[in-house]
Image (cartoon, rainbow, N blue to C red):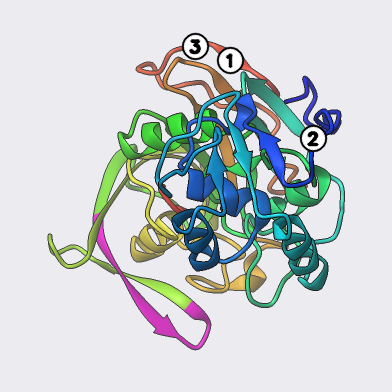
Amino acid sequence: MPEDPHVPPPAPAAEASHIFTVQAVESGQKLLQLLQRRLELPQGLLHRWIRTGQVRLNGGRAKPFAIVAVGDMIRLPPFAQGMAGRKKAGGSASPAAALPPLVGRSGDIWAFNKPSGLPTQPGTGHEDSLAGRLAAFYAGQPYIPTPIHRLDKDTSGILLVAGSFAALSATTSALRRHELSKEYLVWVAGNWRHGARRLTHWLRKASTGTGERMRVSEVPGEGVEASLTVQPLSCGPDRSLLLVRLHTGRTHQIRAQLAHMGHPVLGDGKYGTPGTAPRLMLHALRVILPDGEIFSCLPEWRAPFAVTDMPPLPEDLPLNATGGGGERDPS
């Protein structure tokens, strides 16, 4: 991948349209997975091509879940690229808008400052997304950079992107093992009088008129466990600024848990009152990788919500900062 992910890499050397060589950025995938990423065709169709021998790996038959390596030669049916091209042309492509600011990188892991209002993934009701912008920006490359985790549409801040399949696999594994730390800044309603403390609740999904919403329970087992630590930074009679460190990555857990404590996030129309701030006052401040690499950026909030100083790192985290200043969607 390129040194600067805002500059697309050069196109790979020309090959026959139905034969290609596995690149380093896409190695380690299952054959079926690689073809899905390359062609964006239905899994059942690709599975049938492999099973009937229309797809060849290094000149021979292959199994759908065979792991591909750098330099492997894959031959497709001659009509495959044409089918993939027609499907992509007929789909609803995300606008080729600019990528968000790049905060830093560690190998093939990139950290972007996602703005509020930009979804991580495409979905119902919106075409634009960070994943769509990456797909448009790197169209035609052997591996499309992929978001490693999600932030809620209206949550701003650090969002990691993998520039290779190996980086994606390693980082998502670290997320599952809770070896990657994430911290958020959040303005909440009211005077936080609970001090620094760890909050543990149990969450379950419920459908409402405003879409998906998490119900909070204090009874163990009534849903999935959600845990976070809250450190107050500034407390006033009407609002408080908190630093939140996640221990789990549950959907909407910060918003749901803080609202359950009587301190909804300012500007939150789902769990609080939207008119209390110009936007959702929730920002992904820092991500700390397992090797101690730190990506951070302050929110672009205006007075009276502006934050101008980076909160210090907790003492139990390593200091190896780079860049400025899940898990699903924990915000």
* Observer-nearest of 225 and 125: 125
Q: Residue 319's mark?
A: 3
Q: Judging from the image, what secondary structure is the residue with disc 2 in?
A: loop
Quarter holding the N terminus is top right
Local packing at callout 2 (Cα closer than 10 Å; few below 14, some 14-19, many 20+) is few
Q: Residue 321's mark?
A: 1
Local packing at callout 3 (Cα closer than 10 Å; few below 14, some 14-19, many 20+) is few
Q: Which of the marked residues, 3 or 2, is nearer the chain's N terminus?
A: 2
Local packing at callout 1 (Cα closer than 10 Å; few below 14, some 14-19, many 20+) is some
| Whole-percent x, y for residue 94 in the image | 79, 62
Residue receiving disc 2 = 15
Residue drawn at point x = 72 percent, y = 55 percent: 78
Q: Which residues are magenta?
A: 201-211
Residue drawn at point x = 51 percent, y = 27 percent: 69
Q: Which of the marked residues, 1 or 2, is nearer the chain's N terminus?
A: 2
The residue under label 3 is which amino acid type?
Answer: Leu
